[in-house]
Image (cartoon, grey):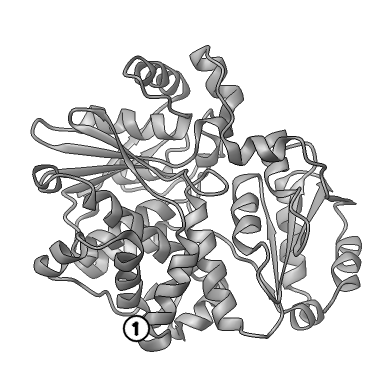
Amino acid sequence: MKLYNLKDHNEQVSFAQAVTQGLGKNQGLFFPHDLPEFSLTDIDAMLELDFVERSSKILSAFIGDEIPQEILEERVRKAFTFPAPVKPVEEDIGCLELFHGPTLAFKDFGGRFMAQMLAHISGDKPVTILTATSGDTGAAVAHAFYGLKNVRVVILYPRGKISPLQEKLFCTLGGNIETVAIDGDFDACQALVKQAFDDEELKQKLGLNSANSINISRLLAQICYYFEAVAQLPQEARNQLVVSVPSGNFGDLTAGLLAKALGLPVKRFIAATNANDTVPRFLQNGEWSPNLTVATLSNAMDVSQPNNWPRVEELFRRKNWRLKDLGVAAIDDETTKATMRELQTKGYVSEPHAAVAYRALRDQLHPGEYGLFLGTAHPAKFSESVEAVLGETLTLPQALAERAGLELLSHNLAADFAALRELMMSKAQ
């Protein structure tokens, strides 16, 4: 598999290089050189397969002979150990629930596949994953890499600024997972990670990798659950399918569009954002003018400069699709709350991000079409806001309940690179 850097098309790398490097020169994103396409007959046959078999075929179409098919399937089987069910919400709308993994969020798919790919590519060479999190990413990365041989994981997070349950989810594992509570905000954590990657000695000695969400392996994994969703739908729904994606960094939407490029029958996509509406405004007036990021109820989508948008534009350019055919919506907090209550009356408990996607879908779905919206996290992950809006107490799922009483194993550090460097070098393998 060849990939090129969107900021410098002359920089071309293999899949293994792209996974290991993460980003190209000038922080450029990697994008597939070839865009494979399945025939309608292939698609129909693939939709009959089970999730793991089908996913292996999809990933193999991109990765090619870099990883033998049987090894790839074995790695996918280890990564995708949980379902992605479509739950009916109305006669013409279902929710693709992506929160049945160990950390109850869609990031489990990408994180676990990336962990398996890095473990395969690195072999016996020690690797240190260093990443900053404001909550969800840290948990997904920690659980994905937990117990993997020759992999050490160091996760920085802002002390006292993530929910107690989120903290318990990934700061109680121990083993090869080290968590560091930094006295500062998320930006301070991110700045420390950048300093570490600028330190050549640290990079070489520890084999640093960031495991961040724009890594191509995480993106490719997300394509698979769009196929899994369609496989669960009756033929009449497949023929008139509209998919609404809660969008912050636009990785999920990029994956969905890549699924469509492969031949998956999706009539159109809707990018559903909150008040951080850079993309809806851009598609309406042609001007890319990010505002300052504002805090909203759907906080995982509080992004005003989405990292993956260049990939979306590149795919539309390569496929000769028209950007104006992409549906968009910006849903404010009051509408989000009202929508959560509306879904509650239909017997479906939703957290804010899924509610944003549902609202955009309900508003734009035409008669005769079937709509899917993505449920990216279990409502219990946002229990405080969900309980406040819905006035009902949520039962903690087992994955959260079993960690709630465990002791935190985090180090506490000042936002000081020298202190972080010392901690990381003290356990150099």
Give the residue type that dot 1 points to. Gly
Where does residue 187 sit, x and y in percent of width and height?
71, 49
Residue depicted at x 71% and y 47%:
186
Position of residue 81 relative to residue 84, above or below, is below
Task: Please rate how many residues cluster around mark 1, counting C-alpha atoms within 10 Å: few if below 14, some from 14 to 19, many from 20.
Answer: some
**Which residue is painted at 23% across and 47% down in the image?**
232
Q: Residue farthest to the top?
A: 391
The image shows residue 130, relative to residue 68, as above or below, that is above
Q: What element carries label 1?
A: helix
Q: Is residue 295 visible?
A: no
Q: Where is residue 236 in the image (x, y as percent from the top left)?
A: 8, 43
| Residue 148 left/right relative to 121 | right
Q: Is residue 91 above or below residue 253?
A: above
Q: Which residue does the image show at 20% across and 47% down from the upper left? A: 268
Q: Position of residue 103 (x, y in %)?
A: 57, 46
Residue at the disc numbered 1: 64
Q: Seen in the image, is 370 located left or right of residue 129?
A: left
Residue 5 position by quadrant: bottom left
Please tell me which residue is depicted at 48% across the width and 51% down the height of the picture: 306
Residue 58 quadrant: bottom left
Q: Look at the image and tell me whether residue 404 can be seen.
A: yes
Q: Quadrant of residue 292?
A: top right
Percent coordinates x, y for residue 29 in the rendering: 48, 69
- Near-viewer residue (67 or 316): 67
